């Protein structure tokens, strides 16, 4: 069955904490985004290689392949020629120098600190993607779909 992408860009949420991963995905899905999830770096790489995503939100402090390493791998192996999505770091880290360095090196396009409010999450994602936040986007997509039907 084909997926209706009229409601918004496709996003990937990468977090080793299932509760966090599913909470972020639920908020974004509720706002009209198509959301896939991955529990770790290798799964995220496979998903990105297998499809197109506008944005990947990556937990910065995952065990094994952490968010910084995953961002480096994606930027170097997927790269612009394979349409690497925008990358956002999700973090509860207080390691300010490391976070600043990650942003300054251009590995991440967006930095979001946990805990996140749903409003802040949606607003940051919508602003970075240049989309209309919230129900207005869904209503506009429904209207557009009706006009093209």
Image: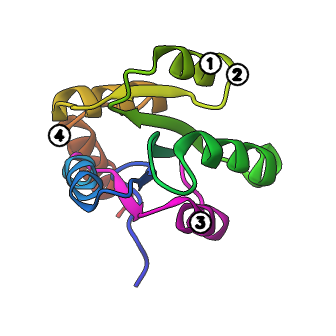
Does the magenta-highlighted stretch encompass residue 121? Answer: no
Q: Earlier in the sequence, mark 3 or mark 2?
A: 3
- Secondary element at image label 1: helix
| Spatial separation of the CA atoms under disc 1 and disc 3 | 23 Å
Could you tell me which residue is drawn at 53 percent across and 44 percent down? 67
Q: Earlier in the sequence, mark 4 or mark 2?
A: 2
Q: Which mark is residue 105?
A: 2
Residue that carries the numbered disc 4 in the rendered image = 135
The percent position of residue 7, horizontal first and vertical second, equals 33, 52
Q: Work out whether residue 62 or residue 120 is closer to the camera in this orientation and state it.
A: 62
- Secondary element at image label 4: helix
Q: Earlier in the sequence, mark 4 or mark 3?
A: 3
The percent position of residue 114, horizontal first and vertical second, equals 27, 31
Residue that carries the numbered disc 3 in the rendered image = 42
Frontmost of labels 1 and 4 is 1
Which stretch did the figure color magenta?
31-53
Q: Earlier in the sequence, mark 1 or mark 3?
A: 3
Task: Choose top left, top right, bottom left or bottom right for residue 69.
Answer: top right
Asked whether disc 4 touches disc 2, contact meaning CB atoms under 8 Å apart, the reply is: no
Residue that carries the numbered disc 1 in the rendered image = 101
Asked whether disc 1 touches disc 2, contact meaning CB atoms under 8 Å apart, the reply is: yes
| Spatial separation of the CA atoms under disc 1 and disc 4 | 35 Å
Say left or right for 123 vs 65.
left
Instruction: Quarter of the image for the C terminus: give it.
Output: bottom left
Q: Earlier in the sequence, mark 1 or mark 4?
A: 1
| Spatial separation of the CA atoms under disc 4 and disc 3 | 33 Å
């Amino acid at each position: 069955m084909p997926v209706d992408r009229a409601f918004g860009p496709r996003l990937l949420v990468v977090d080793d904490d299932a509760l966090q991963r599913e909470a972020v995905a639920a908020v974004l899905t509720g706002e009209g985004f198509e959301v896939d999830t991955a529990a770790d770096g290798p799964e995220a790489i496979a998903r990105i290689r297998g499809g197109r995503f506008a944005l990947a939100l990556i937990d910065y402090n995952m065990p094994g392949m952490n968010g910084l390493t995953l961002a480096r791998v994606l930027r170097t192996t997927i790269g612009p020629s394979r349409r690497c999505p925008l990358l956002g770091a999700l973090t509860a880290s207080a390691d300010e120098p490391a976070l600043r360095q990650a942003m300054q090196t251009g590995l991440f396009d967006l930095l979001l600190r946990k805990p996140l409010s749903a409003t802040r999450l949606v607003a940051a994602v919508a602003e970075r993607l240049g989309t209309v936040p919230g129900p207005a986007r869904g209503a506009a997509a429904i209207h557009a779909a009706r006009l093209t039907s």
